[in-house]
Structures are given as structure tokens and as C-alpha cells.
Image (tube, grey):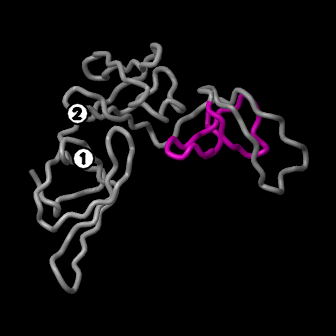
Amino acid sequence: MATTNDLKNGMTLDIEGKLWTVVEFQHVKPGKGPAFVRTKLKLVPGGKVVEKTFNAGVKVDIAQLEKRDMTFLYRDGEDFIFMDSQNFDQMNISAAVVGDSADYMLENVGAVVAVHEGNPLYIELPASVELLITYTEPGLQGDRSSGGTKPATLETGIQIQVPLFIKQDEKVLVDTRTGAYLGRANS
């Protein structure tokens, strides 16, 4: 049990039987009246974001999450099979929990899985991943000055925008949070 004064970004709270992650918070001390804490909370799993205000010093339940280093092994129908890097146990995680992270996951790639009472809640991927471009149109000669982009399909099937000079079968770095092209891979 903690108070609203102990809140931090990324902390997971148990409010009325549902788990919420603190996206951002702000302590407010108005000139008149008691202090309060304004928060932005994200439902886990689900992703619904709400704003909630707490009086300063109010007790809140902090959910105990266990973050495990795991390796994505393969897909089995709608489920994703992960292996714990410590004890080699395998865990089936539904596509709903994996969400958009599936667009950036290749077999044998590491991820952090947040688990609460034995149930996986969400997946944290590295900030960027290296993926191969399986298809893109060739860039036009002399069309470099415009700084334009073109669509490219990656090996996971997702389509992103890349600069015109990028060719098919090149490896690129992709931001897993936004899906943006970051640059060519150094390999």
C-alpha cells in the first residue's frame, strides 16, 4: 500500500479490481483548497487511457508485476509461444495481449513480458528492431532532393515509409513504438 505521493511513471496500480499503468502524473497545490494529484492512467490490458484525480496522500494499491526476460519462439494459431530465459518454461500468450508488438517480432527475438498473478499483461520490445525489406519499388534516379518517402514491406508483413534511396533486401532499423524508419542497419 502506497500513497499518491509515491506515484511514478510506469507504476501499475490496482484500482477497483482493474490494473492501470501511470502514464503521467502531476502534483498540484492550488492557492485555495487541498493539494491533489492529477494522473493519466492506461488500462492494462486494453490500452484505454483515462484521466483521474486523487487527493494528495490518499492510499492506492500498487499491483505487483513480475517482468520476465523471454524469447519469442513461434506462433501457434492465434497464440504466441514465449520461453522464459531463466527456467526455460514456455508460455502461450494470446494475440490480444501481444497487440501491435506482433508487427515487429521475429522468431528467437528477446522481449520483456509483464506478468501479474501468472497472467501475461503486455509485452515490451526493444526501442528499435532490425528488419529486412522484402518488397519496395525502386527509387527514381535524381529524385533525392525532395526528401520523399515510399512504402516498403518488411519481413513481418508490416508496411512502413522509407526514404527513396532504400532498396529491396536491405536491413533497416524500425522504431517499435511508432513504426517509423530510423536508418539502415549496420550489418
The reply to whether the magenta stretch includes residue 180 is yes
Asked whether, in this view, residue 16 is left or right of residue 183, the answer is left
Say above or below: 147 vs 78.
below
Q: Residue at x 22, y 78 (%)?
A: 29
Report the residue that reaches farthest toward the front.
Answer: 16
Instruction: Give the magenta part as a residue range.
Output: 158-187
Residue carrying label 2: 116
Q: Give the mark nearer the N terminus: 1 vs 2.
A: 1
Q: Residue at x 60, y 31 (%)?
A: 131
Q: Residue at x 54, y 32 (%)?
A: 103
Counting from the top left corner in percent of width and height, residue 73 is at 43, 17
Q: Residue at x 78, y 43 (%)?
A: 165
Residue carrying label 1: 12
The reply to whether the magenta stretch includes residue 162 is yes
Q: Nearer the viewer, residue 58 or 90?
A: 58
Report the residue that reaches farthest toward the right.
Answer: 142
Three-letter amino acid code at disc 2?
His
Picture quarter with the C terminus? top right
Using the rendered view, name the quadrant where residue 92 is placed. Answer: top left
Q: Nearer the viewer, residue 23 or 185?
A: 23
Q: Nearer the viewer, residue 79 or 64?
A: 79
Say above or below: 103 vs 144.
above
- Quick one: SS at disc 1? strand
Residue 3 disc label: none
Asked whether, in this view, residue 8 is left or right of residue 93, the answer is left
Asked whether, in this view, residue 155 is left or right of residue 137, the answer is left
Q: How busy is the neighbourhood of tag 2: few (under 14 within 10 Å), some, or many (20 plus)?
A: some
Q: Nearer the viewer, residue 185 or 151?
A: 151
